Image (cartoon, rainbow, N blue to C red):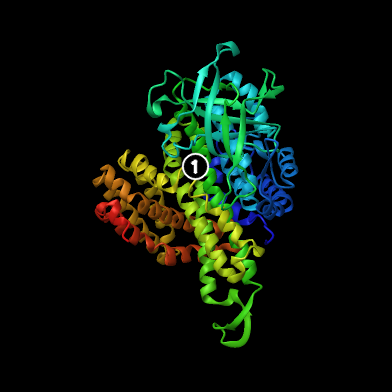
Amino acid sequence: MTVYQAPIADLTLALHTAGLAEVTALPGCEEVGEDLVCAILEEAGKLAAGVLAPLNPVGDRQGCHLEDGRVITPEGFPDAYRQFCEGGWNGVPFDPEYGGQGLPWLIATALQEIWQAANMAFGLAPMLTAGAVELLSRHGSDAQKALWLPRLISGEWSGTMNLTEPQAGSDLAAVRTRAEPAPDLGPDQYRVFGTKIFITHGDQDMSANIVHMVLARLPDAPPGIKGISLFIVPRLLVDAEGTLGAANDVRCVSLEHKLGIHGSPTCVMAFGDQGGAIGTLVGEANRGIEYMFTMMNNARLAVGVQGVGVAERACQAALAYAGERVQGPDVVTRKPESVTIVHHPDVRRSLMTMRALTQAARLITLATAAALDGADRHPDPEARARAEARAALLTPIAKGWSTDIAVTVANMGIQVHGGMGYVEETGAAQLLRDARITPIYEGTNGIQALDLIGRKTARDKGAALSALLADMRATQARARDTWPALADGLGRGLDDLEAARAWVLEHADPVSLQAGATPLLALAGLATGAWLLLEQALKAATLAPSRAEAHRVTASFFIGHLLPATSGHREALKAGPADLMALSPDDLASR
């Protein structure tokens, strides 16, 4: 597999485009200057290139296996995890009171891209731990924070998310795992019984303990989603001082055999086979879904970043191969000598599409993270509310669109490699296999689309989307004097997004919204990506003059070659649900 190098220059410019200056002006971020950001990215790049990336094909080949009831990760993973934690990378965005570094999520998100690009299977473990930290930071009691957060933030212990059950995938109202009060063990102690599936890093040999965040029902819980509570269930029991004790009644009973991310164990977890797994209630009873959404939203942005990371890795691999593979004469210069395929216009179309989509997705995820920082830290309540609305609107786009393009980019990377992409030797096939899970987990992209069109657009009468469009129009206006053709091209995409917003508000019945959700997500992703690429090109003129032309061309390519698809998505949205639902299930299965 091609050597991975973190794209430090592109990441730095993208951070500025996403709002680094505004974020570093927030309370608690004043010391985060340009030099510190560059130093952090450089050091992360060294760990990624020197330690994590070489293990990516190892993890793919070896996978994980069960041995005496424990999951054994691929060779080198435990030592890499030790180095990752010793470097303090696990605690970048978290409260210094519990051992974190207190840096903004914007910086942590850029680092996430580096980890995921280098080795997505490895990166899943700290990614989920970060979600557990975020959950407990917001909803845990003072005693729970004191016990669990320092060890999770350091990485000594890792965290997981336990939602899915065999009969309860996206429909969490169907959760059957139960929790019975255990007053003999102390206040807020319960015995948990049930089975959870698809639990990423549900067991592994990298961290000293694994802290499971588990959804379960109490005996007197109301039915449906409002009757679910949240529990901390560790693999090893701990006392009040955090000393590890006996094994809890929780174990991995099998591992899934998967298309990709072989280095990441996907576990079937059994709770309570031998009398009950001991767990502690988080917050109030029957509010588990509300609490878990903190972790889920954290993970949704992180999965979007996984999409960016895999896409970046695919871009680097495809460009390297295209620069080495000699085939065919140069049709541009009309010279008869054979040239490397990077000189062929059709190959260049693939490479430019991959580059433009990846950079657009990077900007969307970083803009989402910057909004989260504003929602957390801004001293003005109104500004916090605006930032929170922006983060909520962008999250389904960041997760959904960025992972959709990850599959597209990885697939195009195989095509650039030709036949060599279809064999495992080059590593291009692994990138596509790994990328394919990202549109599925942490809420399928269909669910992200429903969230965008329903909760994030129809529910607030399009207010958050209108605010986003106003910022997009401001960039268009600034670009008009310098690049009128680009401004006009962006404007056409924004016209389509405005028309889509109007259609949603006029057709807010559930069937129409569900039918139009996916076209709206695709349209919003393209429009948002085009806006941010143009904004980045404008900033590059002063912040990265040596690369300014490259960023202008990238924005121009996206606006000219990719953004016109918004008109098709607009028409698909307007087509409504009639044809989607016209055929019966029997008619669909025509034979």
What residue type is disc 1 on?
A: Glu
Reading the image, the residue beneath label 1 is 442
**Who is closer to the viewer here, 278 or 567?**
278
Instruction: State which quadrant residue 245 falls in.
Output: top right
In percent of width and height, residue 356 lies at 51, 61
On screen, 367 above or below 217?
A: below
Indicate the quadrant containing the N terminus: top left, top right, bottom left or bottom right: bottom right
Left or right: 78 as drawn, with respect to 361: right
In percent of width and height, residue 431 lies at 59, 57
**Who is closer to the viewer here, 116 or 395?**
116
Instruction: State which quadrant residue 343 falls in.
Output: bottom right
In percent of width and height, residue 298 lies at 52, 38
In percent of width and height, residue 21 lies at 56, 44
On screen, 322 above or below 442?
A: below
Residue at (52, 76) in percent of width and height: 345
Of all residues, the one furthest to the front in this rendering is: 591
**Who is closer to the viewer here, 301 or 123?**
123
Residue at (70, 35) in percent of width and height: 207
Residue at (27, 50) in percent of width and height: 503
Instruction: State which quadrant residue 276 falls in.
Output: top right
What element does badge 1 sit on?
loop
Residue at (66, 73) in percent of width and height: 324
On screen, 345 above or below 182?
A: below
Can residue 94 be seen in this snapshot? no
Indicate the quadrant containing the C terminus: top left, top right, bottom left or bottom right: bottom left
Can residue 65 be seen in this snapshot? yes
Of all residues, the one furthest to the bottom in this rendering is: 336
Q: Residues within 10 Å of mark 1 (few under 14, many from 20)?
A: many
